[in-house]
Image (tube, rainbow, N blue to C red):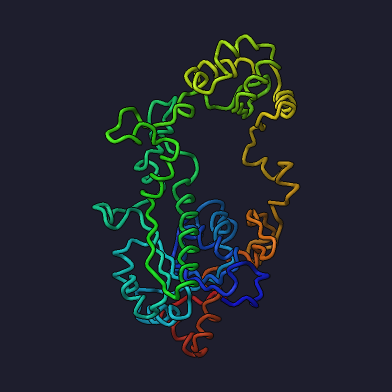
C-alpha cells in the first residue's frame, strides 16, 4: 500500500472507475465514489443518459436529476454498437480498477463486455454488476425499475396502511438504497483487491437487496420456521406512527423510552392516563400501541407546533417540525453545516447543490467539478489513449463518438 500518496482530493484518490451506469441507481453510486476522490469515466450513448432530460430542465441535456447524481465524472460519449466504440472501451478497461454497470447482463454480454470478456482484458479487474434480480433466479432477465422493485419487495404493501390499495413510497427508495449497497460492494471489493491483488465479479441485485432492507424490522413471525405469526413490526404498522396534529399543523414526535412516555403524560397533566396505558412497561405499552398513539395525538392537538418543540426539547423527547422540500435550504441545522452549496455551472449558470454529507477528517470528500455536458471529455480521454486529432475527427464523422468539448 502506498502510504505517501496525496489523498487531499478524497480517500479514493488514484482509483479509476469505468462507469457504464445510467438512470439513478448506478449514477448515484458512482457519484459517491467520485466524491470520495475516484476518477470516474462515465460512458454514455450518443443520445446521453436518460436522466439528462428528466426532472427540471436547466439547459439542453442538463436536468436537475442528472446534475444531482453525475458530478465528479468525465463524460465519454461513444456508440458501443460500433466496432470503433467497442475498441475504445477495450483500451480503457486495462487502465481502470473497477467496471460498474447496471445493464441487463444479457445486454452487456451481447455488446461483448460481460465479465468473462472483460476479465480477459484485465485479470485483476473489480467488475460490479447492479442487476434487477439475482442472476441465479428465474427472473434474471426481467426488466426492473424502482416501482417494480418496491412492489416485489413488499414496500408497496407495507405502504398501503390506511389506504384502499397498495402504494409506492414517493421517492426512488429502491434505486437509491440499492445504489448505496452498490457503493459498499465496490469499496469492499477494492479493499479485497488491495489486500490480495485479485479482482472479482460482484453482483448487487435490486430485489434481494430491497427484501433484506424491508425485512430488517418486518421479519416478525417469518423468523420462526415454519412461521407462527404474521410478518411485520406492529409499532410501525399500527396506524399510529404518523405526524401528530397540533393547533397549527403537524409535528413529528417520538416518545420512545419509558422515561419519554412518563415525562410526556406527566407534563401534559395526564399521568393517570399514562399509567392506564402501561407506559412504564415496554411490553404493555406495545400491546396498547394504538390507544397510546390515539392519546398522544389528542394531547398534541391542544398546543401549537412551536410549543411542543419547546416541551420536547425540555423533556429530551425526539421531535421536529415537518419540513416541506422547498423549506429544506432554510433548515437551521442544514444552514449551519452548509449542506446546500452555491456554484456556477458553465452550461447552466448559478446553481445550488447538496455537498457530500459524509465527512473525513484527513481525506475530505470534494466536489471537484459539476456534471459535464455530453461527451465533454471524449477528446481528452481519446488523446490519452493515443488517438490523433484526425482519428478523433473521423470517429465524430462516423457517428462513433460525440466530441462535446
| Most foreground residue, 271 or 341 | 271
Residue occupying the point 66% across, 33% down: 320
Residue occupying the point 71% across, 17% down: 267
Whether residue 20 sits left or right of residue 300 in the image: it is: left
Image quadrant in which the C terminus is located: bottom right
| Most foreground residue, 337 or 170 | 337
Whether 11 is drawn above or below 259: the answer is below
Whether residue 253 sits left or right of residue 171 in the image: it is: right
Q: Residue furthest left?
A: 138
- Toward which corner of the image does residue 106 lie, by quadrant? bottom left
Q: Is residue 50 visible?
A: no
Whether 213 is drawn above or below 310: the answer is below
Residue occupying the point 62% across, 21% down: 261
- Toward which corner of the image does residue 66 lie, by quadrant? bottom right
- Toward which corner of the image does residue 79 lie, by quadrant? bottom left
| Most foreground residue, 94 or 218 | 218
Residue 78 location (% of width, % of height) = 44, 74
| Most foreground residue, 180 or 361 | 361
Q: Is residue 117 visible?
A: yes
Residue occupying the point 60% across, 72% down: 13
Across the whole image, how many numbered discs are drawn on residues?
0
Residue 288 location (% of width, % of height) = 49, 17
Residue 189 location (% of width, % of height) = 45, 66
Image quadrant in which the N terminus is located: bottom right
Residue 385 location (% of width, % of height) = 49, 85
Amino acid at each position: 500500500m502506498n502510504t505517501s500518496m496525496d489523498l487531499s482530493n478524497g480517500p479514493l484518490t488514484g482509483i479509476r472507475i469505468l462507469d457504464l451506469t445510467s438512470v439513478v441507481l448506478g449514477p448515484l453510486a458512482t457519484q459517491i465514489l467520485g466524491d470520495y476522490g475516484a476518477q470516474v469515466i462515465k460512458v454514455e450513448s450518443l443520445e446521453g443518459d436518460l436522466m439528462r432530460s428528466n426532472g427540471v430542465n436547466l439547459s439542453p441535456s442538463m436536468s436537475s436529476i442528472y446534475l444531482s447524481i453525475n458530478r465528479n465524472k468525465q463524460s465519454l460519449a461513444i456508440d458501443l454498437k460500433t466496432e470503433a466504440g467497442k475498441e475504445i472501451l477495450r483500451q480503457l478497461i486495462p487502465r481502470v480498477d473497477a467496471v460498474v454497470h447496471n445493464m441487463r447482463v444479457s445486454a452487456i454480454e451481447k455488446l461483448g463486455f460481460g465479465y468473462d470478456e472483460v476479465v480477459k482484458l484485465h485479470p485483476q479487474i473489480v467488475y460490479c454488476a447492479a442487476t434487477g434480480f439475482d442472476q441465479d433466479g428465474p427472473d434474471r432477465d426481467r426488466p426492473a425499475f424502482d416501482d417494480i422493485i418496491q412492489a416485489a419487495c413488499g414496500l408497496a404493501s407495507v405502504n398501503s396502511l390506511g389506504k384502499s390499495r397498495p402504494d409506492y413510497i414517493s421517492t426512488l427508495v429502491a434505486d437509491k438504497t440499492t445504489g448505496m449497497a452498490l457503493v459498499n460492494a465496490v469499496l469492499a471489493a477494492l479493499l479485497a483487491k488491495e489486500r490480495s491483488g485479485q479482482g472479482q465479479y460482484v453482483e448487487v441485485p435490486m430485489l434481494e437487496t430491497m427484501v433484506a432492507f424491508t425485512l430488517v424490522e418486518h421479519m416478525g413471525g417469518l423468523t420462526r420456521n415454519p412461521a407462527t405469526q404474521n410478518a411485520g413490526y406492529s409499532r410501525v404498522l399500527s396506524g399510529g406512527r404518523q405526524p401528530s396534529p397540533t393547533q397549527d399543523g403537524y409535528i413529528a414526535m417520538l416518545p420512545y423510552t419509558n422515561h419519554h412516555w412518563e415525562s410526556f403524560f406527566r407534563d401534559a397533566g395526564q399521568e393517570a392516563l399514562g399509567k392506564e396505558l402501561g407506559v412504564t412497561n415496554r411490553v404493555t405499552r406495545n400491546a396498547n400501541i394504538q390507544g397510546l398513539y390515539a392519546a398522544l395525538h389528542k394531547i398534541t392537538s391542544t398546543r401549537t407546533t412551536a410549543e411542543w418543540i419547546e416541551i420536547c426539547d425540555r423533556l429530551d423527547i425526539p421531535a421536529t417540525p415537518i419540513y416541506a422540500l422547498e423549506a429544506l435550504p432554510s433548515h437551521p441545522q442544514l444552514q449551519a453545516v452548509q449542506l446546500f452549496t452555491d456554484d456556477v455551472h458553465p452550461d447552466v449558470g448559478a446553481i445550488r447543490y447538496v455537498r457530500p454529507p459524509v465527512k473525513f477528517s484527513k481525506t475530505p470528500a470534494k466536489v471537484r467539478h459539476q456534471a459535464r455536458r455530453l461527451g465533454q471529455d471524449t477528446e481528452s480521454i481519446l488523446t490519452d489513449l493515443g488517438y490523433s486529432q484526425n482519428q478523433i475527427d473521423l470517429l465524430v464523422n462516423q457517428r462513433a463518438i460525440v466530441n462535446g468539448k
